[in-house]
Image: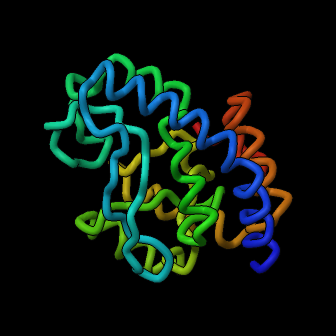
Amino acid sequence: MIGKRFFDFVIALVLIPPSFVICSMLAILIVLIDKSNPIFVQCRVGCNGETFRLYKLRTMRKDALQLPSHLSSTNEITRLGAFLRRTKVDELPQVWNVLRGKMSFVGPRPCLPQQIELLEKRESLGVHTLKPGITGLSQLAGLDMSQPEKLALHDAQYLRKWSLRDDIKILYRTVIKRDHTDVIGRTSR
């Protein structure tokens, strides 16, 4: 997967300058509108169980509980945060994690250390050996962390079938949000 790391590094280098500009402007908006720290930092589990700091633009009130997104109340999301989530712009700071080698553009989403069931299932399937991604097959299929077994099985499918070509397809489908047919060709929903 050396080609994958090279691909991630080059794309991250290209995206860092525009991401920085966009994130800086949005950070100012978040501070002005929500009066909170614009960057959300959370400990997540990465490759081989190593924890790392995941960075996102803040989309929730500053006093919101740090829960997995599928357990969070929509009342906790700010109006600006709803827009950032809908457009996925809140994920832009993760390009920094890709550049640092903590994440990949495509892979299983990084989970929280307390999501034991998902961590154990991923480990049993070998998925824990992958760097977590900003997007992946599970996101295209509309899966979230509320279905740990199904999520881990989707992640294992990605591990078995991995190719740089498929990563490019996943990125393309993520960006244009065209359809949700996975790269193996069957409908995922």
Q: Residue at x 61, y 36 (%)?
A: 21
Q: Is residue 154 visible?
A: no
Q: Residue at x 32, y 64 (%)?
A: 43
Instruction: Name above or below for residue 100 compared with residue 84.
Output: below
Q: For the N terminus, give its image quadrant.
A: bottom right
Q: Residue at x 24, y 41 (%)?
A: 71
Closest to the observer, 112 or 55 = 55
Q: Position of residue 85 (x, y in %)?
A: 45, 30
Give the total number of marks visible in the rendering: 0
Q: Position of residue 74 (x, y in %)?
A: 26, 25
Q: For the C terminus, give its image quadrant.
A: top right
Q: Viewed as shown, does residue 189 lie left or right of 77? A: right
Closest to the observer, 14 or 141 = 14
Q: How is the image coloured?
A: rainbow
Q: Residue at x 37, y 51 (%)?
A: 145
Q: Viewed as shown, does residue 49 lie left or right of 105? A: left
Q: Is residue 2 visible?
A: yes
Q: Viewed as shown, does residue 20 lie left or right of 187? A: left
Q: Position of residue 56 (x, y in %)?
A: 43, 45
Instruction: Name above or below for residue 60 compared with residue 161.
Output: above
Q: Position of residue 29 (x, y in %)?
A: 41, 23
Snapshot quadrant of residue 165: bottom right
Closest to the observer, 146 or 48 = 48
The outermost residue toward the right is 165
